């Protein structure tokens, strides 16, 4: 089970550490403690909360005048659908939902399940999912 510390959760959600703590204190977001006794949130719980938060506050963007050739989105896996050959992986990166299609073997090798912290690298129509160093 992936545990996400308050600071990491705040960065993933695009809010301050204090906001995450207030959500925990008011019961809006559930948390426990990690092995070192610090407050932490289960990855799957944070993934579900990120989806709910994004639905409450959709991002409105204007017309894009410039863009980079490569983008990286750090987020949490929220859903993985596997069949015999392929896997569809959904990632919530702040207010953004990113979907990657990959081989089932790749998804299995990466251990992708809801709550896993990942980086989605976007280049044209390809989304590559990477596991960041801890």
Image: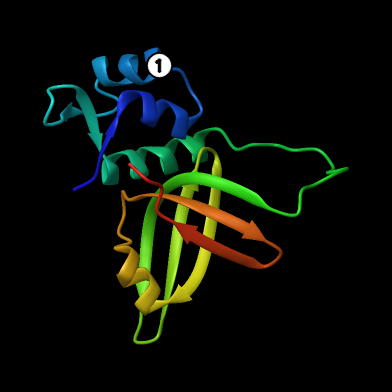
Badge 1 marks a residue whose secondary structure is helix
In this rendering, position of residue 30 left or right of residue 58: left
Q: Where residue 118 appears, x then y in whole percent?
A: 42, 50
The residue at 24%/45% (across/down) is 2
Q: Where residue 123 appears, x then y in whole percent?
A: 67, 61
Q: Where residue 43 appears, x then y in whole percent?
A: 28, 43
Question: As rendered, which of 27 and 91 lies closer to the eye?
Answer: 91
Q: Residue furthest right?
A: 65
Compared with 10, 100 (above or below) is below
Compared with 20, 126 (above or below) is below
Asked where in the image residue 65 lies, by quadrant, the reply is top right
The residue at 80%/47% (across/down) is 67
| Residue named by callout 1 | 19
Density class for disc 1 (Cα within 10 Å; few <14, some 14-19, many ≥20) is some
Counting every numbered tag in the picture gives 1
Question: As rendered, which of 71 and 19 lies closer to the eye?
Answer: 71
Colour pattern: rainbow
In this rendering, position of residue 51 left or right of residue 44: right
Image quarter in which the C terminus is found: top left
Compared with 25, 44 (above or below) is below
Q: Where residue 81 appears, x then y in whole percent?
A: 37, 70
The residue at 59%/48% (across/down) is 72
The residue at 24%/22% (across/down) is 27
Question: As rendered, which of 134 and 112 lies closer to the eye?
Answer: 134
């Amino acid at each position: 089970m992936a545990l996400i510390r308050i600071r990491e959760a705040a960065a993933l959600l695009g809010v301050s550490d204090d906001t995450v703590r207030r959500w925990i204190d008011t019961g809006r977001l559930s948390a426990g403690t990690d092995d070192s006794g610090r407050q932490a949130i289960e990855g799957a719980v944070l993934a579900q909360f990120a989806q709910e938060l994004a639905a409450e506050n959709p991002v409105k963007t204007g017309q894009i005048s410039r863009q980079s050739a490569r983008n990286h989105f750090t987020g949490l896996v929220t859903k993985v659908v596997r069949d015999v050959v392929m896997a569809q992986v959904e990632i919530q990166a702040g207010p953004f939902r990113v979907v990657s299609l990959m081989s089932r073997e790749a998804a299995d090798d990466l251990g992708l399940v809801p709550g896993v912290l990942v980086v989605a690298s976007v280049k044209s129509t390809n989304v590559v999912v990477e596991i960041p160093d801890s």
